[in-house]
Image: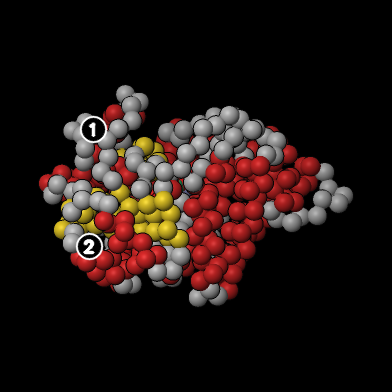
Amino acid sequence: MNEFNYRYPVTVHFGEKSAAKNLPAELEKVGKNVLLAYGGGSIKRNGIYDELMTLLTAAGKTVTEFSGIMSNPTYAKVQEGARLAKDNCVDFILAVGGGSVIDCCKVVSAQAKTEADLWEMETVAHKTPTEFIPMGAVVTAFGTGAEMNNGAVITNTEKRVKGALWGAYYDFAILDPAYTMTMPMSQVISGSFDALSHCMETYMGSPRESNISDEINEAVQRSIIKNLRKTLENPQDIEARSELLWAAAMGENGILKLGKITDFQAHMLEHQLGAYTDCNHGQGLAVIHPVLYRHMLPEAAPQFARLAQNVWGIDPAGKSECDLANAFVDALATFIKEVGLPTTFAEMGIAEADFKAIADSTVLTAGCCKKFTKEELYEVLKECI
Ligand code: NZQ
Ligand code: ZN
């Protein structure tokens, strides 16, 4: 294990009816003016909006709505939210949605407290904000685990960069599996794959020898694979969804990362693909992962071989480490097809993009066992077409 400091600031309220059970007490702790943030309107169609509005009204809150937060939220949308929060003297932000709404509000909460340009502050001056409007998250889509960390993935459309800004942690997160029942099945699948990717990217970091974090990680990966299959078989299986909801949170709450330097090279590449194409995050990862992993295979063989046996149940008898590593990448690629994820950019509707510029603007990660060059990432992208 590498050395680490661990503190976890987010209170999690998990389970059916957890908003009705826990939101009133949480709302008592915060000020009167609430910014209710949400996406394109799914919460109005599935009843979550009405339920939360009733709770907010009963708590005597004055609500300002911040709606239309898009998938792959933009820095411009962050500025819109920050202006609303300032103009309405907002004391508390309630973010209701998937990773996009939850991420956007992390930065709104900081931007509303400063006149500084947060993008410049964080990416040029390398300073992080220190003042935030308190926030709560109501998760309606699993996958990113964004509710459990303080990193926000924001697209700066002018700079053509999709990158991390560090915002606030949520004070609490409400995770009700019933709220996820109306997720489009394509989002269930891409979100689950995103969660699996977070686990793999963490696992592939260093140290390369297995430690306790990796052993927990293997269990989370097995759970995601099993419960996505169950959900596809029976979309009404709320138990399977509840497992996916918590597995996704586990992927990004830091526990699997303890004692590790993480990899996340697939994510860095996908984020830049997103900056140029606005594609779905989990789908982009599904196309990139097997191709990138074939490039990583010689260096990553010991870890891939462990995943083959401990996650994918591949019998090691008569197989070399290299055979097992290949069998892992094959199993992953087969699973991607099995669950209906795209296997090429063409299937995602990405016919053309500036792959050279995407590769050149991708962050090279320290934890990846292979030291990729931008030229090789460009090759990876071309193989994904
Ligand atoms: O906008 P609405 O109308 O709400 O519809 C959303 C959206 O269209 C819909 N949806 C969500 N819950 C629903 C629902 N539809 C019906 N019923 C429900 N219960 O799902 C669509 C996708 O939502 P979105 O929030 O965009 O998806 P996701 O959770 O995958 O978030 C993606 C964003 O998170 C970032 C991604 O890069 C992307 O920008 N990530 C954030 C991470 C983090 N902070 O830790 C880690 C990830 O690696 C990722 O990069
Ligand atoms: Zn992700």
Q: Neighbour class for label 1 at 10 Å: few (<14), some, many (≥20)? A: few
What's the residue at 28%, 46% (across, down)? Answer: 134
Front one among 338 and 193: 193
The answer, for residue 330, to whether it is visible in the render is: no
Percent x, y of residue 218:
65, 50
Q: Is residue 334 above or below residue 105?
A: below
Percent x, y of residue 60:
18, 62
Where, by quadrant of the figure, is residue 64 drawn? bottom left
What's the residue at 69%, 53% (across, down)? Answer: 311
Where, by quadrant of the figure, is residue 68 drawn? bottom left
Residue at the outermost right position: 318
Percent x, y of residue 354:
41, 41
Give the spatial CA distance, label 2 vs label 1: 34 Å
Q: How is the image coloured?
A: secondary structure
Secondary structure under badge 1?
loop
Q: Is mark 1 within 8 Å of ligand 1?
A: no
Residue type beneath disc 2: Ala
Residue at the outermost top position: 125
Front one among 214 and 92: 92
Q: Quadrant of ligand 1?
A: bottom left
The residue indicated by pointer 1 is 117
The residue indicated by pointer 2 is 59
